[in-house]
Amino acid sequence: MRVRATIDPMPGEARKTNLVDEVYHHIRSDLLAARFAPGQWLRLPVFTKQYGVSLSVAREALTRLSSEGVVEAIPKRGFRVIELSLAELKDLTEARVSLEVLALEASLRSGDQQWEKSLVSSHQLLERTPMRDSETNLFNREFVPVHANFHHALLSGGRNKTILRVTHELRERSELYRMWTPLSARSVRDIVEEHKQLTEFALARDLESAAKLLAFHIDHTQEALVSAPELTPGTSAKSSG
């Protein structure tokens, strides 16, 4: 009787998957660091040359980003960064305030000692991570995941995984808007003091103060964009309402 051998994935297929992952993370990092303008076309040949990959690899990476809503796939034309929609930002802000405040209250009620340690360490790292790259004067790529990790730690004391997943998805979607907010519209208090106070209120289990500050903190991006719709050079605000 002939025994059928188990065949591992072809090395070429595995390599392509790894390349797609690498290109995806590079482009996504640049998107969240505001390296591309809203509505900017993302040309495949540029990425094939920049990363030394095939057109199919670059296309798969952009397709993956389009499924997350940060890149738009235009039939027969290609890919472009999503354009700003103040109507969408308003919807995102309202949804985030409602759900994140709910998640925060659950986190403060259920968070244990390990949650407290995680929150403190994530806040310490956030304080040590500058938002601006000192060499390029652009947004610091390292700030984005560190900031996201802080907000995840803040809410992670809760037990409802569905709420945590949805709040994460909404925060990811709104991250582009936050990073496109002009640096001139951001106060030092927003970056430093609000995170510090959120941490202190959370550790003190002060539900009312923490919830009020988090709602204000989330709403800051919307206010900054509405008051400074020009954003950065070459970008534009597009209202769908």
Image (spheres, grey):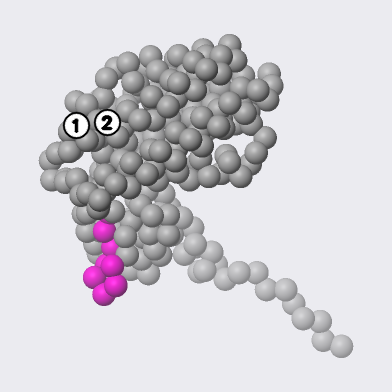
Residue 24 picture location, percent across and down: 40, 54
Residue 99 visible? The answer is yes
Furthest residue in direction front, as rendered:
241
Q: CA distance from mark 2 to mark 1?
A: 6 Å
Is residue 143 on the magenta stretch? Answer: no
Decide if residue 82 is on the left or right side of residue 99.
left
Give the secondary structure at mark 1: helix
Instruction: Name the residue that disc number 2 marks.
Output: 223
Residue 227's label in the rendered image is 1
Q: Amino acid at mark 1?
A: Ser
Is residue 4 or residue 203 the one in the foreground? Answer: 203
Q: Where, by quadrant of the figure, is residue 63 drawn?
A: bottom left
Q: Amino acid at mark 2?
A: Glu
Is residue 79 on the magenta stretch? Answer: yes
Q: Where, by quadrant of the figure, is residue 182 drawn?
A: top left
Within 10 Å of the Cα at label 1, are there few (<14), some (14-19), or many (20+) other Cα atoms?
Answer: few
Relative height, residue 3 to residue 143 (above, below): below
Decide if residue 57 is on the left or right side of residue 168.
left
Q: Are marks 2 and 1 in contact (CB under 8 Å)?
A: yes
Relative height, residue 115 to residue 209 (above, below): below
Q: How many numbered circles are shown?
A: 2
Residue 238 picture location, percent across and down: 20, 49
Residue visible at 69% across and 21% down in the picture: 112
Residue 231 picture location, percent across and down: 18, 38
Residue 206's label in the rendered image is none
Within 10 Å of the Cα at label 2, are there few (<14), some (14-19), or many (20+) other Cα atoms?
Answer: some
Is residue 141 or residue 231 the one in the foreground? Answer: 231
Decide if residue 111 is on the left or right side of residue 56.
right
Furthest residue in direction bottom, as rendered:
1
Most prominent secondary structure in the magenta stretch? Answer: strand
Q: Where, by quadrant of the figure, is residue 195 drawn?
A: top left
Chain part drawn in magenta: 74-81
